[in-house]
Amino acid sequence: MMKLYGFDTINTLKVLMFLMETKADFEFVPINIRAGEQHEPAFRTINPAGKVPVLFDGERHQVESNAILLSLAQKTGWGLVDNPDLTAWLFYQASTQGPHFGQLEHWARFAKVPNPEALKRQQDIVTGIINYLNDQLSEKPFICGDTYSIADIALFPWLHIHEHLGLSLKNSEHLTRWLNQIRIRPATFEARKVFGNQSIF
């Protein structure tokens, strides 16, 4: 049986969404990163980088959420599309959307010392990302075309919690339509349930 080591995080949610879509048989192993469990020796033997999620696929421990998505898609055939931009979108999410949305969350919610300049910079960058994605979805239902894929899963979690970040999608009708399509999928609902009622998800 597969084991998913994770916590109430954006990147763990991605993998959970995939596993629920494919009705995979797996065990969820909570690693409380707020309590520092990712730094304990037992977990560091699984992932020396001390990060979640980690997926044990029955043979090896896989790390980095988008790499896990791609590996699972290649093994199962689910979530892949015949589109040369699929991998590029996974890289875009990891290199651009994820870091900037994460920085916005830091400056908006967690920074002990406020930095209005840094906050404004991240808000501007994130607004540009939202506008870009909205434009990309103006003539297609999903990010790679007509079919829901791992690229959509990768991009979904940060946008799902946009209100938590103080963001509005009221002028992003295409992105809002896309977001709502994914929210109502049974697998998305089941993945979010794993974290419980207190989760921001």
Image: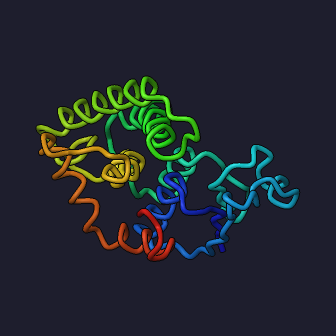
Q: Residue at x 56, y 35 (%)?
A: 113
Q: Note whether 166 is above or below 53 in the view shown.
A: above
Q: Note whether 141 is above or below 83 in the view shown.
A: below
Picture coordinates of residue 40 (x, y %)? Answer: 84, 58
Q: Quadrant of the C terminus?
A: bottom left
Q: Quadrant of the N terminus?
A: bottom right
Quarter occupied by residue 21: bottom left
Is residue 81 found left or right of 117 in the rendered image? Answer: left
Q: Report the front residue among 77 and 160.
A: 160
Q: Residue at x 62, y 72 (%)?
A: 28
Picture coordinates of residue 62 (x, y %)? Answer: 67, 52
In the current view of this chain or complex, which residue is farthest to the right? Answer: 41
User: What colouring style does the render use?
Assistant: rainbow
Is residue 120 found left or right of 169 in the rendered image? Answer: right
Q: Note whether 126 is above or below 76 in the view shown.
A: above
Q: Note whether 15 is above or below 127 in the view shown.
A: below
Q: Residue at x 68, y 49 (%)?
A: 51
In the current view of this chain or complex, which residue is farthest to the front? Answer: 113
Q: Residue at x 32, y 46 (%)?
A: 166
Picture coordinates of residue 78 (x, y %)? Answer: 40, 58
Is residue 152 found left or right of 22 in the rendered image? Answer: left
Q: Report the front residue among 42 and 68.
A: 42
Q: How many marks?
A: 0
Picture coordinates of residue 138 (x, y %)? Answer: 13, 38
Q: Report the front residue among 111 and 82.
A: 111
